[in-house]
Image (cartoon, rainbow, N blue to C red):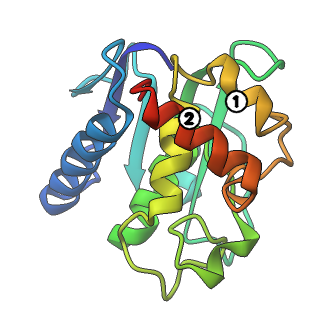
Amino acid sequence: QKGTIKVYIHESVPEEDRLIIANFLSEIKELIRNESIQFEIINELEGYNIGIVKGGPLLFNELFKNDRSFPPSYLGAATYTRNNQDCAQIEKAELWYTEGETLLKHEILHTLGFFHADYADKNGSIMYHNITDMEPDMTENDKNVLRLLYYNGVYGSIVDTVADCDEDAMYMDKVESEAFKLLLKSIIDNDYL
């Protein structure tokens, strides 16, 4: 997503969660340091890029006019549409969650292009698929992946060197590689981030 990312927060989201969302988006903006990307929280469903609802799949499907089914064990989920299939910009994303700061942040990161990371249980990543016991803060690896995904705009050309942008790709797993570490060091050393 480039330019102004309009975030619609449904009335089902309580005030304390709205504050979590606003603070998390500010943290993300500070991390990516890309002036072409701004977040704007909006009160109308029309024109949103990211939609957030607290509740289950029934409210989610009704509000966003979806017909998606989710396993009964799910406590939240995010869906999105891309402009095209070739590692393209996310056009629109929606999420639902039932409770918890960690789950909310996890689903927000999905709407921004993150996939699950199986290795993450070793380092506490917020993107581990089972977040029950995870802390609500991003690890340094999470932050590095965010910086990389939004380097040179969303899914900038540099992403092609570390991930194949396939639905099954797990960007988070790439951060453990030496190639990724060298690439990120080069970007930071040259003040590209």
Which residue is located at x 41 percent, y 58 percent?
Answer: 105
Camera-side residue of 77 and 182: 182
Q: Residue 28, labelled with which disc?
A: none
Tell me the quadrant of the picture where the C terminus can be found: top left
Q: Nearer the viewer, residue 53 or 154?
A: 154
Sequence order check, earlier mark of 2 and 1: 1
Residue at image location 40% in from the left, 44% down from the top: 52
Q: Which residue is mark 2?
A: 186
Asked whether residue 98 appears in the rendered view, the answer is no
Circle 2 or circle 1, nearest the eye: 2
Which amino acid lies under the numbered mark 1 shown in the image of this protein? Val
At 55% across and 22% down in the image, what residue appears? Answer: 154
Question: Looking at the picture, which amino acid does disc 2 mark?
Answer: Ser
Residue at the far bottom: name it. Answer: 133
Q: Is residue 100 above or below residue 106?
A: below
- Tell me where residue 149 appears, x and y as whole percent: 58, 34
Helix, strand or loop status at disc 2: helix
Kindly tell me whether residue 86 is visible in this rendering.
Answer: yes
Picture quarter containing residue 135? bottom left
